[in-house]
Image (cartoon, grey):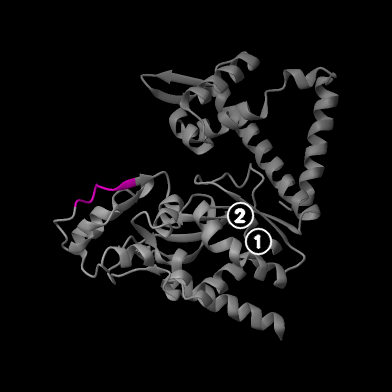
Amino acid sequence: MKPEKVFVRLRKYYLKNLEDHKIQSTKSFRDPPWQNLRAFEVSARLLSFTKAAIELNLTPAAISHQIRSLESRLGVPLFERDNNKLSLTAKGEAYVRTVRDALDMISVATDFLRGLKDDERLRISVLPIFATRWLIPRLPIFKSIHPEISVHVSTAYRLVDFLHEDIDAGVRYGSGDWPGLKSWYLFGEEVVPVCSRRLWDKMGRITTPSGLDRITLVHSANTTEYWRLWLTAVGADGVESSGGITYDNCLLALEAARAGLGMAMVNRTYLADEIDRGDMIAPFEVTLPRGLGCYFVCAEQRAEAPGITAFRNWLIATCAADGSPLNEAARRQQLNVQTAQRAQAS
């Protein structure tokens, strides 16, 4: 359906209800809250309060409370609960179809309005380490190429809901497979042990993995297995992988290594300039193969929005120019970007 037709349908729907049901000024107090309807639609689709809670970043108890609140407002049960098995009642089946259509229409209408008035504003959600160590230093270049686009950057570890939150696109770490999203590979992981030159000199310039028993190992709470896997891969059985200090996230672990507090397992991409200058030392060639990477992501229906397309093409081209590790899919993407840019120039 074309976005502009959504407004016509919404208006007809409202006027029909106004005529058929004599909507009064008190109607807004009887209508279920948005969050109740959203919880209902997701729970009905997944037939699980637990899975709905994960998708909506809530607790199962919160989802259950919202469903009970909705059923109380409507005066009818929407779900049958039998031995931890969830199913829709007949009235629930009928209601969810209308609710789903309404939510979809509102979503499309919202995207249409954003396209009309916010073409020059792009809201991006990225990982904190990507924002600090890669994106922010390079944003002035994008601004010089696209002065008409204002980029608003927010950071989060969770995958935001691009359809229902005020975010247009993002950069996330993983396999590139997220339901309802389209993804483009940016760069992979070259996870290597890294420390400051000052610490490396102080510890006698360690050149063999077995020598790491003389240095403090820095861990990130969300990648605690990295040291164990790497030490096993290089055969350094005598080094205790669980020792050292642990920080809450990989950005803090990286900063600890930069400050000379120890050696951390870090994606080489985030320290490439400092390693090239010799300020940071990556003394070992062996990397930790993870098969994962950083991806640019957005909702499938917004993949061709002008601002999103411009930012995506710039990211892909910049990653290639930086020499970030690319896979075959990324090389094809870069070729497509270059082809499109030549076509626009001709």
Earlier in the chain: of badge 1 and badge 2, it is 2
Which residue is most to the left? Answer: 238
Q: What stretch is highlighted in magenta?
A: 240-245
Residue 196 visible, this angle: no
- Circle 1 Cα neighbour tier, 10 Å, few/some/many (<14 / 14–19 / ≥20): many
> Which label sits on residue 308?
1
Residue 242 lies in magenta, yes or no?
Answer: yes
In the rendered structure, which amino acid carries the disc numbered 1?
Ile
Q: Residue at point 60% right, 67% down? A: 138
- Measured in 3D between alpha carbons, the distance from the residue under mark 1 to the one under mark 2, in whole angstroms, is 7 Å
Q: Do the residues labelled 1 and 2 touch (CB within 8 Å)?
A: yes
- Circle 2 Cα neighbour tier, 10 Å, few/some/many (<14 / 14–19 / ≥20): many
In the rendered structure, which amino acid carries the disc numbered 2?
Ala
> Which label sits on residue 169?
2
Residue 283 lies in magenta, yes or no?
Answer: no
Where is residue 79 drawn, in percent x and y?
A: 50, 21
- Main secondary structure along the magenta-highlighted residues: loop
Which residue is most to the bottom? Answer: 346
Residue 95 against residue 149 in the figure, above or below: above
Where is residue 80 drawn, in percent x and y?
A: 47, 19
Where is residue 175 drawn, in percent x and y?
A: 41, 57
